């Protein structure tokens, strides 16, 4: 018998959590589970899912954002959450849903919808709540109302240590990343053929650390290296465009504006990987399990990343990548300085990373674990 799982997700782009939802919804065993997805807006994810035969409904969803973590902001979200509960619960009952899977822990409404429908609730935790200590005790209690809390890394799981609902379930490779031919990739992105290209991919925000890379260009061994170029791939959230402006202002202030190339969001990440000599993941706050690092490593890129969050679980320092202190432009510059003139070491690190992460973080393994969890909950 095929059961229906209702998925709630916080966005409709093609970033990490979006790709993971796509991988889950399109990878289910059709003899066991089918996906019904609710998104808060139209977008690339909705198009991709529909193109692969997954039913997608678009309706407002209550989603916590960093920018609204204030009493007034939380009040607005709470009102939207209350409106969510009845509508989503009725939808779940009408479509004979067997399980509700909320794909990020900042997406609300799933818990109440599952309760209304009388079905289990899976609340996927892809976030680390550093900086929100004021709100965390209450929000943790809310999350623990779920029947299951799969956490994408140990760094994420420790927020719930001792709670039987929580378990570690790392993401799998949502795409099969490769590296495009170098010269063609650089021509497509407008970066010099003879440059040493250091790429950073992901949503441009105040905590993802793109500014750390830009500042590193003006530090230590990189300051005089006009041939070292930062390639920034990604866009900010709507309404947070200031983060991109600030990057350009920092670069101009350091005199490295000509060494920073912003190529916007690129769905063809293979082109970015092909152009890059090194990929950095310089998150300033603990990053739960960044797909940018996972995919770059799987593509065979040399990855330099912050030594916190889920990154040390993904990369072994000096073996499959290089880990540096977070938020430290000088340390990042020193690590990159050791790599820019050592292509053999870059290649060795990239090759080791490719073999390691493809073995440990396959999509098939992730899907088997997810569906095993669903089957267990459905039998209860």
Image: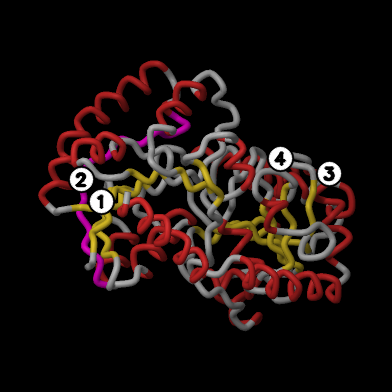
Q: What distance separates the C-alpha of mark 2 from that of mark 3? A: 45 Å
Sequence-wise first label, 4 or 3: 4
Q: Quadrant of the N terminus?
A: bottom left
Residues drawn in magenta: 53-67
Label annotation for residue 90 = none
At numbered mark 1, what does the secondary structure look like: helix, strand or loop? Answer: strand
In the foreground, 371 or 241: 371
- Residue drawn at x 57%, y 22% is 133
Q: Counting residues from the N terminus, which is met first, the one under dot 3 or under dot 1?
A: 1
Q: Which of disc 2 and disc 1 is earlier in sequence?
A: 1
Examine the rendering and report whether any part of residue 135 can be seen.
Answer: yes
- Residue 54 belongs to magenta span: yes
Which numbered disc, 2 or 3, marks the residue that appears first in the sequence? 2
| Residue bearing the label numbered 4 | 253
The residue that disc 2 covers is 59
- Foreground label between 1 and 2: 1
**Which residue has dot 3 on it?**
330
Q: Is residue 258 visible?
A: no
Report, in whole angstroms, how far the alpha carbon at label 1 lies from the one at label 4: 44 Å
Circles 1 and 2, Cβ within 8 Å, touching? The answer is: yes
The residue under label 1 is: 38
Residue at disc 2, secondary structure: loop
Instruction: State the SS at label 4.
Output: helix
């Amino acid at each position: 018998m095929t059961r229906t799982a209702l998925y709630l997700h916080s966005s409709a782009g093609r970033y990490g959590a979006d790709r993971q939802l796509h991988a889950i919804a399109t990878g289910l065993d059709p003899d066991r589970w089918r996906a019904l997805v609710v998104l808060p807006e139209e977008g690339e994810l909705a198009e991709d899912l529909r193109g692969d035969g997954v039913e997608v409904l678009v309706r407002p969803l209550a989603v916590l954002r960093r920018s609204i973590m204030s009493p007034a902001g939380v009040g607005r979200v709470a009102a939207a959450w209350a409106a969510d509960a009845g509508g989503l619960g009725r939808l779940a009952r009408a479509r004979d849903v067997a399980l509700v899977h909320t794909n990020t822990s900042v997406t609300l409404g799933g818990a109440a919808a599952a309760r209304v429908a009388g079905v289990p609730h899976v609340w996927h935790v892809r976030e680390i709540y550093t900086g929100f200590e004021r709100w965390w005790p209450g929000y943790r209690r809310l999350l623990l109302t779920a029947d299951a809390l799969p956490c994408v890394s140990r760094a994420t799981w420790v927020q719930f240590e001792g709670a039987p609902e929580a378990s570690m379930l790392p993401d799998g490779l949502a795409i099969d990343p490769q590296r495009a031919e170098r010269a063609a990739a650089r021509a497509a992105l407008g970066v010099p053929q003879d440059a040493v290209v250091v790429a950073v991919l992901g949503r441009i925000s105040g905590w993802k650390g793109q500014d750390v890379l830009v500042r590193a260009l003006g530090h230590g061994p990189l300051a005089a290296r006009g041939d070292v170029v930062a390639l920034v791939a990604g866009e900010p959230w709507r309404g947070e465009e200031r983060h991109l402006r600030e990057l350009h202002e920092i670069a101009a202030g350091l005199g490295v504006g000509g060494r920073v190339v912003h190529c916007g969001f690129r769905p063809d990440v293979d082109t970015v990987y092909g152009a890059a000599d090194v990929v950095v993941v310089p998150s300033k706050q603990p990053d739960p399990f960044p797909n940018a690092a996972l995919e770059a490593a799987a593509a065979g890129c040399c990855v330099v990343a912050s030594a916190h969050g889920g990154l040390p679980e993904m990369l072994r320092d000096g073996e499959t990548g290089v880990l540096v202190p977070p938020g430290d432009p000088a340390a990042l510059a020193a690590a990159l300085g050791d790599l820019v003139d050592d292509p053999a070491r870059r290649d060795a690190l990239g090759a080791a990373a490719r073999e390691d992460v493809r073995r440990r973080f396959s999509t098939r393994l992730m899907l088997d674990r997810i569906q095993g969890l669903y089957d267990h909950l459905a039998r209860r």
